[in-house]
Image (tube, helix red, strand yellow):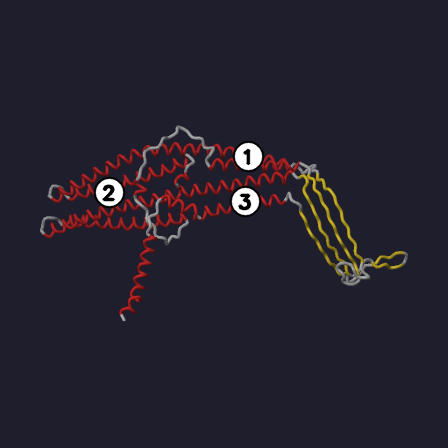
Amino acid sequence: MESKNKPMKLIPLLLLGLMLSNFTYAQQTLTLKEALNYAVQNNNEVRKAKLDIEKGRYKVEEVRSQALPQLTGTAGLNYNPVIGQLIFAGNAVQIGNKWSSNSGVQLSQQLFNQQVFTGLQAAKSSEIYYNLNSQYTEEQTIEMVANNYYQVLVNRQQLNVIDTNIKNVGIVEKIIANQYKNGLARKIDVDRISVNMTNLTTQREQTLNAITLLENQLKYAMGMPVSTIISLPAAELTQVRQLPELASSLSFSNRTEIKILDINRKLLELQRKAYVSEYYPTLALSANYTYASQGDKFDFIGSGPLSVGYGASAIGLTLRVPIFNGFLTRSKIRQADVDIKKADEDRSNTNNALNLAYENAKIQLRNNLNTINAQRKNADLAQEIYTSTQNNYNNGLATLTDLLDTENALTSAQNSYTQALLNYKIAEIQLIKSNGNIKSLLQ
């Protein structure tokens, strides 16, 4: 009996093992690099931008089709219940037959049409635009996910500070409770420490909720199911590299934003060229062949004894020469000129904005690095003061007010240090983006 029961006992253990292995996998640490690479592959906006690239290729094929031969087939069948007559020399002559049919094929080919040729150039430029837009969408996603990632880490760091404070206050709370029982402490001291503990507990719950919301926002930005459990290493926030070498100025011609504006201007120029092409003549080749038949009975191909069938064909050239359209084309060209000038203004403004972002990132990076060093020392000093005050309080050499004040000072110093880390990381991302190297975060 025991040998029979062993497999049954193993089944729950195996299931438990599978559940634990899945749980371990779900709790895997997600580094910044892994989060960014996941986002580039799964973010919905990035995927849509890549679909636009595919759409752009089909758009080129659509425009190219206008320069290819156009072939059309036609067919028709008519039944005439009442046949008309023509009076000739006093006699009525029947016109036509009860049944008539026709079928044919038509061919047309553009030989010269400047608008079609310009459209082909615009379609190819549009394909380049969609590629650049996809790249820009990736860069925006990387920046957004990186910022959200560090926001989660900062709140988790703040949660650690709160947990440490709760632990310290809990120790003091026990000491005061014992002192109060022995008549060595006042009721107001017990109440004050109780209020402090309640405030910390409430603050912890609020921070936990904030972390959950920020994690959900991070997962949404990554394109990850919100139900997925993630864990982020704290070292991603606390690792601060030395200040990189900063150039006095940068050329932003290789920035994706500038490239998009440049290709957009080219498209506007091609649009203007298409309007100018309306002044040009067009030349097209056309050819057709038609076969028709008539008879008193249904006979689509006209093979019956009372049916008549015949064919006809024609080949020709069509030349269209614009003469005057009420200055419509001129108005379109002038509007296009205005759009091109506006595009130049946009490029100039964007270049200034990128330069501003770069200069600000340099300043913020320097300031935040100095702030990190200062706040780290300040937090260490606040910790020493709190430890000393706590010892003095335990020995009756400091008041509860002194202890609570030093605790608040310690919390403030630790949070300031954490905020300085966040500001540094955000400035670092902006600097990397200004250099046009935001994708280096993926490596």
| Secondary structure type for disc 3 | helix
Q: Say whether marks 3 and 1 touch (CB < 8 Å).
A: no
Q: Residue at x 54, y 46 (%)?
A: 55
Distance between the alpha carbons at the discs numbered 2 and 1: 56 Å
Q: Which is more foreground, mark 3 or mark 1?
A: 3
Q: Residue at x 24, y 42 (%)?
A: 411
In the image, farthest residue toward the top: 248
| Residue behind mark 1 | 340
| Residue behind mark 3 | 56
Q: Describe residue 81's horizontal placement relative to residue 275 as left or right.
A: right
| Secondary structure type for disc 2 | helix
Q: Residues within 10 Å of mark 3 (few under 14, many from 20)?
A: many
Q: Nearer the viewer, residue 99 or 135?
A: 135
What's the residue type where badge 3 is placed? Gly
| Residue behind mark 2 | 411
Q: Residue at x 74, y 43 (%)?
A: 316
Q: Describe residue 129's horizontal placement relative to residue 2 as left or right.
A: right
Residue 68 vertical placement versus 310 (above, below): above
Quarter assignment of residue 425: top left
The location of residue 391, given as percent across then percent down, is: 14, 42
Q: Quadrant of the C terminus?
A: top left
Q: Residue at x 58, y 39 (%)?
A: 122
